[in-house]
């Protein structure tokens, strides 16, 4: 069974994000870009499933500009067998991404798609579920453990009330939560070796799906700032302030 | 301009998120129907019918809707979608799982985590862990959205809507519920609590978490939260995690104990009305967000605070 793992190139989780003063978006100039952390967890899981024998091949795919080659190189270094770049210079929304991924799933005969549960840039959290719906597949979102059992997968999910375990028939979409695994450390030899591997390239425009944006971003704003607080010296001071000043006790 | 809102419930009780998401829906338009889906959910539907401003409660009670698996919920919503311009759900585990399926099959781009309604097609939503706010306008004929419930106050329970039964025609199920481990406690639910006490990495163990953070929460009648580290280390359950990828809370009072204040955690609590931070590191970023900061050893300060509050409350 082939597994597909999409990798999104996003601002690094440690980067300081600033809104452009003219409200046209966030300023990503000189910001370090990395693979979306949840996508790395998804990839690690796919590689582990291949190592355990349930998956035959792990294909990493990124959709975007030529710069996405960086995150695909990292994916190959971590253990992906193949990497595909679907080129587009448009800003693509989750719906368009899901449609592009669905064409790839069909073309490659994918049996399991593992995605990050959300990207840490737009925080939308939609692509995996949309992909599952477009393919008519079941889904297991927010996975904290995955066990392949022949024609199905047993997945434990992190849900609002605690943990839920479900079984999904394969083919299926799984989205990775934080506790699914800790991606392995990738050493220099693996990075050097990954540089030799080819990255297949396709053009998003030629995939036969509509890519146009449905949402128009009218403006991007700074979030409201909190007024500066005060430091208190003792627990007694704190209790007084909470009772008399804040009135929350 | 009719709106369909998916109710959030736990199988027996309607949860607070529904009344909050309803407030958002009523800002979009006045014809709001609430869909209550599940098995043996008559009482939940009754509660939903009591929320102010609801036009009709649609009750779908079926074996195939037990445990509210997103494939079945999405299929049910799609059966009903024809009559609505807007389909909304609270941004809960269920809403986040089911609504993108609905959106994709309606060929609509979903708007996730709405924090303000500016017009029926224009919304505010946070991006980059709340470090920026986008104002987005949808050009789709129908809108599908999830609502960040901490951004809306719940509507009152002063309504008396009619309840209609809707039939569910299930497709062959390809996912099955196996089991659930729910944290049982008498404490208020994290997303709805007036006071939240959260612990971080500095607690270091389950025992410390219990004797410091949980003990303080108990004195205050507060919900318990955590930053990522205690959950990763296994001494706090996953449903306590507050942050960008966990729960988003906006209580009256948030007490952060031994939490450094990474942006991923701050994203989940910075809309609290009053924030208290207790940390041994005077330079910890959490103090930039705190209304009241107390620098020192939490293992001394938190028991002192617990004792002082126990005294004032008794």
Image (spheres, rainbow, N blue to C red):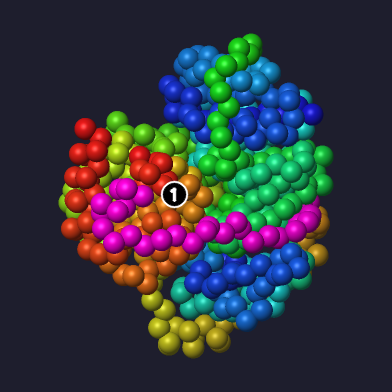
Q: Is residue B31 above or below residue B112?
A: above
Q: Is residue A223 above or below residue B139?
A: below
Badge 1: few (under 14), some or many (20 or more) residues near its Cα, within 10 Å? many
Q: Quadrant of the N terminus of chain B?
A: top right
* Label 1 chain ID: B
Magenta residues (range): A214-241
Position of B30 with respect to B149 (left or right) is right
Residue A206 or residue A124, whichever sits in front: A124
Q: Residue at x 52, y 63 (%)?
A: A39
Badge count: 1
Residue B267 or residue A68, whichever sits in front: B267
Q: Residue at x 62, y 24 (%)?
A: B34
Position of A209 with respect to A59 (left or right) is right
Residue B45: x and y in percent read: 54, 17
Which quadrant of the view contains residue B294?
A: bottom left
**Residue B3 in sight from this viewpoint:** yes
Position of B212 with respect to B170 (left or right) is left
Q: Quadrant of the C terminus of chain B?
A: top left
Q: Residue at x 37, y 54 (%)?
A: B276
Q: Is residue A248 above or below residue A79?
A: above
Residue A221: x and y in percent read: 68, 60
Position of B1 with respect to A148 (left or right) is right
Q: Residue at x 68, y 49 (%)?
A: B124
Residue A231 or residue A118, whichever sits in front: A231
Residue A43: x and y in percent read: 48, 65
Residue B23: x and y in percent read: 62, 32
Which quadrant of the view contains residue B58?
A: top right
- Let me know if residue A142 is in the magenta part: no
**Callout 1: helix, strand or loop?**
strand
Q: Which residue is mark 1?
A: B274
**Residue B61 in sight from this viewpoint:** no
- Let me know if residue A225 is in the magenta part: yes
């Amino acid at each position: 069974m082939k597994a597909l793992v999409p990798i999104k190139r996003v601002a690094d989780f440690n980067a300081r994000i600033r809104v452009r003063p003219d409200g046209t978006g966030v300023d990503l100039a000189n910001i370090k870009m990395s693979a979306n952390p949840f996508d790395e967890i998804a990839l690690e899981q796919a590689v582990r499933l291949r190592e355990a024998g349930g998956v035959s091949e792990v294909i990493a795919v990124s959709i975007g500009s030529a710069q996405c080659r960086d995150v695909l190189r990292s994916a190959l270094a971590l253990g992906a067998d193949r990497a595909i770049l679907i080129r587009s210079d448009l800003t693509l929304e989750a719906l368009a991404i899901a449609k592009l991924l669905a064409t790839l799933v069909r073309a490659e005969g994918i049996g399991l798609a593992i995605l990050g549960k959300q990207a840490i840039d737009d925080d939308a959290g939609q692509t995996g579920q949309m992909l599952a719906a477009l393919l008519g597949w079941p889904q297991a979102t927010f996975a904290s453990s995955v066990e392949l059992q022949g024609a199905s997968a047993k997945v434990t999910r992190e849900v609002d009330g605690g943990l839920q375990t479900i079984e999904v028939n394969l083919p299926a979409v799984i989205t990775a939560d934080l506790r699914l695994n800790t991606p392995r450390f990738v050493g220099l030899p693996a990075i050097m070796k990954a540089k030799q591997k080819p990255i297949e390239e396709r053009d998003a425009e030629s995939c036969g799906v509509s890519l146009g944006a449905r949402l128009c971003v009218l403006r991007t704003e700074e979030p409201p700032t909190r007024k500066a607080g005060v430091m208190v010296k003792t627990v007694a001071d704190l209790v007084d302030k909470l009772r008399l000043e804040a009135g929350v006790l | 301009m009719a709106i369909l809102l998916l109710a959030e419930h736990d199988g027996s009780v309607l949860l607070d998120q529904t009344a909050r998401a309803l407030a958002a829906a009523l800002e979009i338009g006045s014809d709001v129907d609430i869909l209550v889906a599940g098995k043996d959910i008559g009482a939940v539907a009754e509660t939903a019918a009591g929320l102010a401003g609801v036009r009709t409660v649609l009750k779908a009670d079926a074996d195939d809707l037990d445990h509210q698996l997103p494939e079945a919920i999405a299929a049910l919503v799609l059966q009903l979608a024809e009559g609505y311009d807007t389909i909304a759900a609270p941004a809960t585990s269920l809403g986040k799982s089911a609504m993108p399926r609905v959106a994709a099959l309606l060929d609509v781009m979903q708007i996730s985590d709405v924090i303000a309604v500016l017009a029926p097609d224009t919304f505010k939503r946070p991006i980059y862990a709340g470090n920026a706010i986008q104002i987005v306008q949808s050009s789709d004929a129908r809108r599908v959205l999830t609502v960040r419930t901490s951004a809306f106050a719940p509507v009152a329970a002063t309504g008396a809507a009619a309840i209609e039964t809707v039939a569910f025609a299930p497709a062959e199920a390809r996912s099955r519920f196996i089991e659930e481990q729910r944290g049982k406690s008498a404490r208020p639910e994290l997303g709805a609590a007036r006071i939240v006490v959260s612990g971080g990495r500095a607690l270091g163990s389950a025992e410390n978490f219990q004797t410091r953070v949980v003990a303080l929460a108990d004195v205050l009648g507060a919900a318990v939260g955590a930053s990522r580290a205690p959950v990763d280390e296994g001494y706090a359950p996953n449903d306590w995690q507050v942050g960008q990828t966990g729960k988003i809370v906006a209580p009256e009072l948030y007490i952060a104990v031994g939490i450094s204040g990474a942006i991923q955690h701050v994203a989940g609590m910075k809309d609290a009305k009053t924030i208290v931070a207790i940390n041994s590191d005077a330079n910890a970023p959490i103090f930039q967000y705190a209304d009241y900061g107390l620098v020192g050893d939490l293992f001394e300060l938190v028991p002192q605070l617990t004792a002082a509050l126990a005294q004032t409350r008794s």
